Amino acid sequence: MSQDCFHCGEFIPPGLSLTVLIDDQAQDMCCLGCQAVALAIVDNNLEDYYRFRSEKGNKVSATVPDELVGNQFIDDESLQSEFTFDVENGKETILSIDGMSCAACAWLIEKQLKQKPEIEKIQVNATTQRATIVWHNDVIKLSEILTAISQIGYQALPFKANVAEQRNVQQSKAFIRRLGVSGILTMQVMMIAFGLYFGAFSDLAEHNLAYLRGTSFVLTLPIVTFGAFPFYTGALTALKAKRLSMDVPVSIAIILAFCASTWATVTHSGEVYFESLAMFTFLLLIGKYLEFRARARAAEVSANLLKLMPLSATTLLTVNGQVQEQVISAKLLQVNDQVIVKPGETIPGDGIVIKGSSSVNESMLTGEHAPVAKNKGINVFAGTVNGDGNLIIEISKANSDSFLTNLIRLSESAQAHKPAIAQLSDRIAQYFVAIILLTAVATSFYWYVNAPEQAFWITLSVLVATCPCALSLATPTALTCGTTRLNKDGIMIKNGHVLETMPKVDCFAFDKTGTLTNGEFALTKTVLLAQQYDKTSVLSLAAALEAHSEHPLAKAFIPYRDYAVNVDNVEVVPGCGITANKDGYQIAIGKTSWLRKSTPIEQQYQQAQCLLTVNNTLVAVFYLQDTLRDDTVEVLECLHQNNLDTVLISGDNRSGVDAFRQQVRLKQCFDTCSARDKLSILKDKQAQGKNVAMVGDGVNDSPVFAQAHVSIAMGSGTEIAKSGADVILLNNQLSSLLKLKQTSAKTSRIIKQNFAWAFAYNAIILPLAVCGFITPYMAVLGMSASSIIVVSNSLRLLK
């Protein structure tokens, strides 16, 4: 009987006999909890976990949280509203998972949950220890999912930024501890090494030589065991998963060098390289820490965004006819609550200004530092800071569906995606490791035959000098830094392929309204065509219909909304208009090309932007005017100077497009386009060999966005989660297209530079190491410098 638990590794109390049959072998357990977890793993055919894991699992009594004892409470709708999101296939949430120690843990959790057909999507990130889950809430409850995870020995709870930040801080402290111990001891070993170097040229007494070597051994031991421990676990994980990572040759080099130096110390023969080994490990840890910080800086963006939320909010309550202020937790705000935000305070939730005017700093969300004017009827967003006036706001969205929360969720999703170029980088690095190992074996054999006394150290130099680490870091660090840079500029990357696809784009297709124009229409003229309807009634009818639309035209009717006028059976026809019933009448509002299919329209009114019909009779015509964005002309000119095609694909009538064309220069313009027409034009461009980026306002653009190589939506802060775009310009500035193009191109260049450096370095250093011209000490410096150069080059993107 084993004395240690097979699952968690803890001591088994005397007299206790608990076993689980794993791979046809009875394995001993220390408690009923570990036995239950092991049985759950076996019952679900997940025994491979025990073969792949690099560390023992957590003791189950410490893994199952008190919250899960009564986890049915987590199914409460009011509680779930804080951390779940409604999506097309059910609900989505991000879970923070404690107890994960290696990649095998992520594999085990995914395998466990993928067996449940009610779970639509499960992605576990072993690095961040987070899981993104989409499930059918009407079939399976969240509490059941948490219980399924706890059954295999992990604690899963809704993701909280402060917990994630604490974990990041803990990892940083662990790195610093390893760096501190390794750095201090390396300095001591190097000082002793100077004594050994000078002793080689003088008659150093044998007992003094043995003392110095023995001291070096004692000082190097913590570096090899504690400092280099992450490399060993990484190598074991890779080998158990039948993969080769850069940790494999590194671990082999460390172990061989330490064993050989120890043997030389014990037998008083040969050379010792404790100083090279210590420096090698220390420099590698520096490279690892820089890589960690590069990733952490991007991860901190999400955590820092949540810090923008205030802890409290001041609500307005009417008691006995008197309006009173009451301070409550911002998390308790409900839709339709009214809050007052005073100058300098942070807005606690998404809402609409119902009284007051002020300027609001939205730079933390959009990257635009200029204050934005806010007055009655304008949207405001949680986390932004009120400027110089009092605002009374009516909350329009729950915290779980706020602009800020959706921004964080989309950022997490984008970082979880691994683009093709990153996958290629991983494969190249893996094959390169195999080449290194084969080269090391061949080198060892050659030198053992020709110069046995040199064989070991030359082989060690081959293992150390070559750097698959630089190859592995070449792509992911650049992509992470590029994405973070764009986020800071108010450019939200939703899909990871953008940074590798965008440099290839040679054609920009634009929608007009809300994209090249401000999308802020003003009603300039109303023509009445039916005696029974006056101006007030037609405007209130139009406003009631347009209230169900997200199109920029609809905003022009907001001031005319009469909440006493309601419509039924509303149907929004994308790209065309809206129909509804009112007191038994069929009413419709929309564009001419759509309404004239059922309603006669005189020629003089066919150029109007918006028409209202009742029972297929035209009753009113609305003329609206939009304004050109301040940067439209400049952006289009810059695109033309870079030999990029520009195409306007608009649903507006010909006269409107012709008038617009007089203000700007576009290479091609298409008018009166339906959604199908837009899709056809885009396909034609792609058939001509063009890589097309479609830029629109994100409303009714889903088919076209799906067809484009890159889809870009102007983000005015509404419904960003529902947008099918690859990129959202949160700052709502067209000039961000130039930043996106430039940063993508710069990221692509840096990736190529990283690859060029990594390949050039290895192509030069490998032959030199094989020929014996590189000592282990030189190899250590070269390998560490190679990795640091790659990471530092990528960090330039953050400037």
Image (cartoon, rainbow, N blue to C red):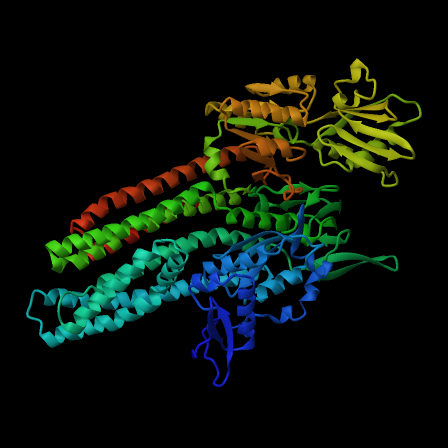
Q: Would residue 700 be found to the left or right of residue 172 on screen?
A: right
Tell me residue 507's x, y (percent).
52, 26
Looking at the picture, does residue 252 appear above or below residue 759? below
Q: Quadrant of residue 516?
A: top right
Q: Count numbered badges in the picture.
A: 0
Residue lying at the far left of the rendered structure: 203
Tell me residue 533's x, y (percent).
91, 27
Q: Would residue 160 be found to the left or right of residue 655 on screen?
A: left
**Which quadrant is the C terminus positioned in?**
top left
- Residue 647 shows in the view: yes
User: Residue drawn at (14%, 54%), measured in percent from left and top?
Assistant: 447
Q: Toward the viewer: 748 or 130?
A: 130
User: Residue drawn at (6%, 67%), measured in percent from left and top?
Assistant: 202
**Which quadrant is the N terminus positioned in?**
bottom left
Q: Would residue 643 be found to the left or right of residue 228 on screen?
A: right
Tell me residue 256's x, y (percent).
25, 63
Residue lying at the far right of the rendered structure: 532
Q: Toward the viewer: 275 or 678?
A: 678
Residue lying at the far front of the rendered structure: 24
User: Residue drawn at (45%, 46%), measured in percent from left and top?
Assistant: 481
